[in-house]
Amino acid sequence: MANKHNTTLRPYMCYALDPQDGALLVFAYTAVGARKVAMPTMIAWFDADYFDIRAVRLKRNAKYFMSLKVSDEPHCIEEPPVCNGCDAWTCIDNECGE
């Protein structure tokens, strides 16, 4: 359900503890909503609970991340495309220079 103040899905990176250990690409209306969407996967991946999950809005390259959206409802993508140079999915078009 959309937040009454925000009706547009936004891309978030959700992770528990350290994003290098594993992170999800989540589309949600708010950071709180992103944490809720990410929670089942984060619990399955890690020994984590809701309070361990962090959501960071992906403002840089948002248009690219939005192109990966597969639904108009909040959802997560467990394995988004990764950079050939650094293997990070937050690095777009080899911007890392590796």
Image (cartoon, grey):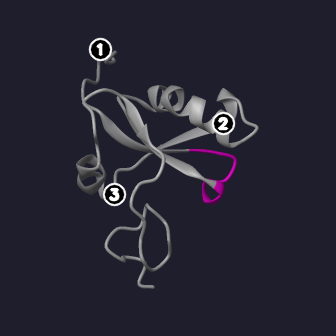
Horizontal arrangement in the rendering, residue 79 relative to residue 92 (left or right): right
Q: Mark 2 points at which residue?
A: 44
Residue annotated with mark 1: 4
Q: Which amino acid does label 2 sit on?
A: Ala
Task: Classify mark 1: helix, strand or loop.
Answer: loop
In this rendering, would 18 be left or right of 68?
right
**Residue drawn at 36 percent across, 76 percent down:** 95
Gap in angstroms between the C-alphas marked 3 and 2: 28 Å
The picture places residue 36, in percent across and down from the top left corner, at 52, 26
Percent x, y for residue 65? 31, 52
- Amino acid on which the number 1 mark rests in the picture: Lys
The structure residue drawn at horizontal position 28% and vertical position 24%, both measured from the top left corner, is 6
Whether residue 17 is in magenta: the answer is yes
Which sits earlier in the primary sequence, circle 2 or circle 1?
1
Residue contact between numbered discs 3 and 1, judged by CB atoms under 8 Å: no
Q: What stretch is highlighted in magenta?
A: 15-21
Cα–Cα gap, marks 3 and 1: 25 Å
Residue at 25% across, 24% down: 7
Left or right, residue 42 beside residue 83: right
Residue 96 percent location from the top left of the image:
43, 78
Q: Residue 60 carries which label?
A: 3
Identify the image quadrant of the C terminus. Answer: bottom left
Q: Which of 79 and 31 is in front in this view?
A: 79
Q: In which quarter of the image is residue 77?
A: top left
Kind of residue sitting beneath label 3: Arg
